[in-house]
């Protein structure tokens, strides 16, 4: 178990590129934190700095109060699961799992017992003597997990561990990993570009963009109260609708229609609303033109235009809908307003 | 619907026979070209082989023929155990031994040194990495042949004429294997070394536990290519070895050809058989380990 | 370099040492020595040498024999390169076509790779034997009185044939593996777009083979210039006389037999410059060469 603390951690590569602007956050004991963001946002760099695979340019990293900046990866009491699993292709599953223990001069009987435990936990018993090339993607993933588990680390690091799996397997492994982490109670940092993984697995999400932390919060906070238009459009599928609106005399107007009363200030704003927070119906105050209906079985997505801007609505499967003009209403408590230039929430 | 389908099938069927015939003609043409090519490659060897089975007198009269004689064991005895030359040292057996020492020594030396250097270049952060890289890879630019005389002088100054070291080490002084292993190491997934570091493996452990076993196929391919290359060296051994007990088979070929002159009856059987013996080991290696060899050869083209 | 390389200080130096020492002693020293002695005139009795500046090079440029050898080398190189590349390409295309016996053909066509050039030269001597050589007889049957070692052109022809015989297999291996690495989907797309087989070859296959072909072009030029030494030395039976020879052979004859170290070194330097130019040319084209991935 571990508490991890980052204080103004910064990464600048020798060529001068700043991969991470000074960033700080703390991770509590047993917490599952997900770093999410588009590729190149600095999330992997951050994880690799925690692992010790990348040098920390500035700032201080502590694990359980101990400064780790210059500690060798092997001595940080961490385990890491890689995107391509990084299994040693010439070693059997058993040897792969045991390699880290062997290097720490763990007694043979202890190694054997731990490997057996991990294998039982991950349903790998029958595969212990196979080579990685004889395993399926999901099984390889489990071996990688096993390798991490046997070391009883203080901290698990996951670097996009599921992105090489197909969609169905990914859903299944997502649940397995989460359950395993709950059971072992090991503090975990998990990097992904998939917002669904972030939402479903995290105790807390850290959304990153262009080397900066955009927002830190629980999945619900991130989803319902995005701190910026970037977070609003990155999290959620389909993403939050973002519409230019005007703030005038305490009212938010789109095309002359009032959508929200009692807001302060004046001038242009960006209005954000989740597709499911829109109500379809003749009594709605805003006109909306439906172009395409996406039938998804459990629900439908109506794509169209609102005041000449793209807009999507999520409706239940039993709501009647047809292409053409219709009227909608926005749930006023679900609206978030953003600054039109900086994109920050107001 | 069914009718339309049937029509389509009919239509196709009526066109099938001529198309099939055309393809078959093409295939026959392909085979013909390949057979001619194979004969072009094989016939010279078969003729030489045939000539080792008949008495020399017959060869002098008719050259290669279709007769298979009984002279092979006798010729083999002459080739392997009788020396030509003055010292009586250059029997086929002795030359064969030297060829193996050169081929294997060269291959092993080159692989060992190349792997070590490539490991240093690919897996370490070094201050002079770029400089080391260029110093090493410049050697790919100039074949031994263009610096043959000064190289000879260096070996002479070091007192290594007529020694195995003098024969082998200067040939190792080019970076082909280093280059090859560098390419291969670079293709090894980045995450393996990271996983190993987290697993507590240091540089030496990683090299021995992971990188070397991973490179097994590559090492084998390299070994085959380098063995053949070393075995077939001619110019360098010709210059460095002047004592007959140091001759390799390929180096000895010049003397073999000289027995074709002379006033006595030229020893065709012996000469041809020695040529065959010089060919067999590298050819066997190439044929038996064909897929490794092809892989090793073609993957260096990158 | 790997992004997460090791940071040990002395280990990499230790690992590099053997290679660096060997190339320093057996590559850079001799190469520098060659350049240096090309500016000196060696006393024929071994009593020191005199600095003569560029005289050795000027001698070369004014030496009719050297120039004609250079000219022969050019023709020889062009012939060997062109013939061995085109024969190999033809065979590779055919071997890639056939379904049955492909592996046997491959083996039959590639084993000569492992034959040493001088041994190939020896086999050439047998094939072109004056009284009963099968190829001599073949030539005679079309009225060509072939005289190896006597007639300059005949000897040169034999050298070209033997050198090509020796070089076809390696080109074949590369072309075949190049052909086999062309994705199936590309071939299928071509099959749909173009019904003529030769059209498909020139429009699709040949351009996709271009990188391989270019690499081989350089390899073959280098082979013709240097590796054919063994072929030539055996076929002239170590007696150059009036026989054809290449530049490398001339370096050897002058330096090793004739003891003209300065002149031979100057020739070495000329060859070095030639190889360097070739390599630079190769790198520049490789940089610009189109990657189809």
Image (tube, coloured by chain):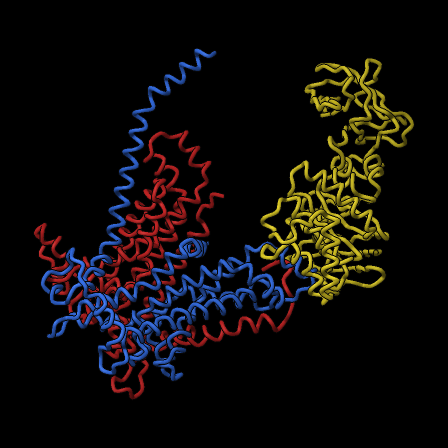
Asked if residue C154 shows in the view, the reply is no
Q: Is residue A68 left or right of residue B142?
A: right
The residue sitting at the bottom extreme is C47
Q: Position of residue C293 (x, y in %)?
A: 49, 43
Which chain gets the red colouring?
C
Pick the residue in front: A217 or B92.
B92
Q: Is residue B301 left or right of residue A127?
A: left
Quadrant where the image shows the C terminus of chain A: top right
Vertical position of residue C168 compared to residue B32: above or below: below
Pick the residue in front: B138 or B173.
B173
Q: Position of residue B55 (x, y in %)?
A: 15, 66
Looking at the rendering, which quadrant does residue B255 occupy?
Answer: bottom left
Q: Is residue A156 left or right of residue C287?
A: right
In percent of the image, x 35 and y 29: which residue is there?
A: C195
Quadrant where the image shows the N terminus of chain A: bottom right
Asked if residue C188 shows in the view, the reply is yes
Which chain gets the blue colouring?
B
Looking at the rendering, which quadrant does residue B107 occupy?
Answer: bottom left
The residue sitting at the right extreme is A262
Vertical position of residue A173 compared to residue B159: above or below: above
Which chain gets the yellow colouring?
A
Could you tell me how many numbered marks the image carries? 0
Q: Position of residue B59 (x, y in %)?
A: 13, 64
In percent of the image, x 53 and y 74: which residue is there?
A: C17
């Amino acid at each position: 178990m571990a508490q991890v603390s980052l204080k103004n951690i910064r990464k600048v590569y020798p060529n001068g590129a700043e991969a991470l602007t000074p960033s700080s956050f703390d991770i509590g004991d047993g917490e599952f934190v997900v770093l999410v963001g588009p590729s190149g946002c600095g999330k992997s760099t951050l994880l690799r700095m925690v692992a010790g695979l990348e040098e920390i340019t500035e700032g201080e990293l502590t694990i359980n109060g101990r400064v780790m900046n210059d500690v060798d990866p092997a001595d940080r009491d961490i385990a890491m699961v890689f995107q391509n699993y990084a299994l040693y292709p010439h070693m059997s599953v058993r040897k792969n799992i045991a390699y880290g223990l062997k290097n720490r001069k763990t007694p043979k009987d202890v190694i054997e017992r731990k490997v057996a435990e991990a294998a039982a936990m991950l349903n790998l018993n029958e595969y212990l003597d196979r080579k990685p090339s004889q395993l399926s993607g999901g099984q390889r993933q489990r071996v990688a997990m096993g390798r991490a588990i046997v070391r009883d680390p203080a901290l698990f690091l996951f670097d996009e561990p599921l992105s090489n799996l197909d969609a169905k397997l990914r859903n299944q492994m997502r649940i397995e990993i989460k359950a395993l982490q709950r059971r072992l109670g090991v503090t975990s940092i998990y990097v992904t570009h998939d917002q669904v993984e972030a939402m479903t697995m995290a105790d807390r999400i850290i959304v990153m963009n262009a080397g900066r932390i955009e927002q830190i919060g629980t999945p619900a906070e991130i989803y319902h109260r995005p701190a910026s238009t970037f977070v609003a459009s990155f999290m959620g599928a389909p993403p939050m609708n973002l519409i230019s609106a005007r703030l005038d005399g305490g009212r938010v107007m789109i095309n002359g229609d009032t959508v929200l009363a009692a807001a302060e200030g004046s001038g242009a704003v960006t209005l954000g609303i989740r597709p499911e927070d829109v109500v379809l119906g003749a009594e709605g105050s805003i006109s909306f033109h439906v172009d395409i209906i996406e039938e998804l079985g459990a629900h439908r997505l109506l794509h169209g235009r609102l005041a000449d801007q793209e807009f999507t609505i999520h409706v239940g499967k039993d709501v009647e809908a047809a292409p053409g003009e219709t009227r909608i209403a926005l749930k006023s408590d679900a609206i978030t307003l953003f600054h039109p230039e900086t994109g920050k929430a107001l | 619907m069914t009718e339309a389908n049937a029509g389509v099938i009919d239509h196709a069927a009526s066109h099938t026979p001529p198309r099939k015939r055309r393809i078959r003609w093409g295939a026959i043409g392909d085979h013909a070209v390949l057979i001619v090519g194979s004969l072009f490659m094989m016939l010279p060897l078969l003729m030489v082989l045939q000539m080792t089975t008949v008495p020399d007198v017959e060869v002098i009269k008719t050259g290669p023929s279709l007769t298979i004689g009984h002279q092979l064991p006798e010729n083999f005895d002459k080739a392997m155990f009788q020396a030509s030359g003055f010292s009586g040292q250059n029997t086929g057996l002795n030359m064969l031994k030297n060829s193996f020492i050169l081929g294997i020594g060269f291959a092993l030396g080159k692989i060992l040194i190349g792997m070590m250097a490539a490991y240093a270049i690919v897996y370490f952060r070094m201050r002079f990495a770029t400089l080391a890289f260029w110093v090493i890879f410049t050697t790919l630019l100039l074949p031994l042949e263009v610096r043959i005389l000064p190289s000879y002088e260096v070996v002479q100054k070091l007192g290594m004429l007529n020694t195995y070291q003098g024969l082998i080490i200067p040939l190792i002084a080019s970076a082909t294997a280093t280059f090859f292993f560098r390419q291969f190491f670079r293709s090894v997934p980045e995450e393996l070394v990271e996983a190993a570091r987290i697993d507590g493996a240091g540089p030496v452990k990683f090299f021995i536990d992971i990188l070397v076993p991973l490179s097994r196929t590559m090492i084998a391919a390299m070994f085959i290519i380098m063995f053949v290359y070393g075995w077939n060296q001619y110019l360098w051994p010709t210059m460095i070895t002047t004592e007959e007990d140091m001759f390799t088979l390929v180096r000895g070929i010049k003397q073999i050809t000289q027995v074709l002159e002379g006033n006595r009856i030229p020893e065709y059987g012996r000469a041809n058989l020695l040529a065959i013996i010089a060919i067999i080991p590298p050819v066997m290696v190439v044929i038996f380990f064909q897929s490794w060899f092809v892989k090793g050869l073609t993957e260096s083209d990158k | 370099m790997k992004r997460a390389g090791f940071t040990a200080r002395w280990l990499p130096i230790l690992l590099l040492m053997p290679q660096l020492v060997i190339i320093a002693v057996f590559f850079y020293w001799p190469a520098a020595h060659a350049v240096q002695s090309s500016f000196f005139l060696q006393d024929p009795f071994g009593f020191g040498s005199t600095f003569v500046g560029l005289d050795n090079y000027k001698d070369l440029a004014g030496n009719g024999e050297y120039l004609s050898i250079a000219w022969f080398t050019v023709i020889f190189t062009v012939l060997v390169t062109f013939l061995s590349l085109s024969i190999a390409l033809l065979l590779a295309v055919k071997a890639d076509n056939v379904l049955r016996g492909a592996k046997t053909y491959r083996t039959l066509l590639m084993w000569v790779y492992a034959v040493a050039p001088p041994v190939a030269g020896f086999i050439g001597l047998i094939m072109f034997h004056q009284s009963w050589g099968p190829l001599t007889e073949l030539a005679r049957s079309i009225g060509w009185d072939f005289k190896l070692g006597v007639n300059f052109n005949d000897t040169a022809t034999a050298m070209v044939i033997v050198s090509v015989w020796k070089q076809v297999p390696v080109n074949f291996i590369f072309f075949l593996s190049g052909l086999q690495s062309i994705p199936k989907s590309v071939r299928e797309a071509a099959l749909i777009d173009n019904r003529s087989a030769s059209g498909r070859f020139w429009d699709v296959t040949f351009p996709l083979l271009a990188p391989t072909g270019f690499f081989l072009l350089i390899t073959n030029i280098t082979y013709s210039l240097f590796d054919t030494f063994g072929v030539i030395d055996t076929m002239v039976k170590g007696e150059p006389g009036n026989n054809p020879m290449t530049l490398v052979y001339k370096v050897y004859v002058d330096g090793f037999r004739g003891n003209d170290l300065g002149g031979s070194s100057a020739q070495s330097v000329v060859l070095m410059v030639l190889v360097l130019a070739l390599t630079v040319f190769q790198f520049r084209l490789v940089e610009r060469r189109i990657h189809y991935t």
